[in-house]
Amino acid sequence: MTKLRILIADDHDVVRSGLRPILEGQANWTVVAEAKDGKEAIAKAVEAQPDIAVVDYSLPLLNGVEVTRQIRARLPKTEVLIFTMHDNEALVQELLRAGARGFVLKSDARKYLVEAIEALSVHRPFFTTKVSEAMLQTYVAKSSQAVSPLTNRERTIVQLIAEGHSNKAIATTLNISLKTVETHRASVMRKLSLSSSAALVRYAIRNKIVEA
């Protein structure tokens, strides 16, 4: 029987080391890669081509939304399971839009994680707590509605600014020019009516783009 190949992406070593024995304790499951930030998660996914990617929403460099979007674009057969502490509806809808098909709270891991991966392994959605297939239906019906005033690239830049990266470092991380970063940054400040980097960081925390 073919082994189910799994990638774990979480910036906490203790979480990754805790998940590995749980997952590899299941028959014919194997963890083929681990990643500690969003950029590494995408690179490891492309390299290992897992069947399931277990992705923490609050990853450094690129968060779970951008990681999900890029993995699904590059590896359409790989299912993404979001593993997070957050369960607000706006975040869930954004993740669904990015292509995630599973969502498990970290507090529910022992109860639902294995079940969620089993569901995704046969390409069936799995959601816990307030998230359900009913919400999925609601999302599909409202898919044309915007969740955020920012574009995906702008949200990524907001995350990197809030994490303390300079414009030059952001340009290097995203493989874009410094001028492009500055243009996006100015656009964000204008859209959100913000006048300082400190206000931008507060916005990022309040909207769960980064954790406090």
Image (spheres, rainbow, N blue to C red):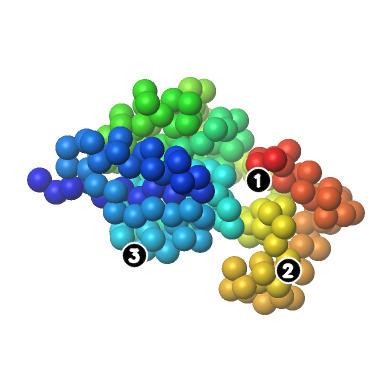
In screen coordinates, is 208 left or right of 72?
Answer: right
Residues packed near mark 3 inside 10 Å, few (<14), some (14 to 19) or many (20 plus): few
Residues packed near mark 2 inside 10 Å, few (<14), some (14 to 19) or many (20 plus): some
Q: Amino acid at mark 1?
A: Ile
Quarter of the figure with the C terminus: top right
Which circle's residue, 3 or 2, is located before the other in the chain?
3
Residue 13, which numbered label?
none
Secondary structure beneath label 2? helix
Residue 65, given in percent of the width and then of the height, sits at 54, 49
Residue 191, given in percent of the width and then of the height, sits at 80, 53
Which circle's residue, 1 or 2, is located before the other in the chain?
2
Nearest the viewer among 171 and 19 is: 19
Quarter of the figure with the N terminus: top left
Say if mark 3 contacts mark 2, CB within 8 Å.
no
Q: Amino acid at mark 2?
A: Asn
Residue 166, given in percent of the width and then of the height, sits at 73, 66
Residue 77: in sight, yes or no? no
Q: Which residue is mark 1?
A: 209
Q: What is the spatial separation of the Cα atoms under label 1 and label 2, in whole angstroms?
A: 18 Å
In screen coordinates, is 210 left or right of 52?
Answer: right
Q: Quadrant of residue 18?
A: top left
Q: What is the spatial separation of the Cα atoms under label 3 and label 2, in whole angstroms?
A: 29 Å
What residue do we see at 65% from left, 41% from top? 211
What residue do we see at 42% from left, 64% from top? 43
Q: Quadrant of residue 115?
A: top left
Which circle's residue, 1 or 3, is located before the other in the chain?
3
Residue 167, given in percent of the width and then of the height, sits at 73, 68
Q: Which residue is mark 2?
A: 167
Residue 118: in sight, yes or no? yes
What residue do we see at 30% from left, 38% from top? 21
Residue 47, which numbered label?
3
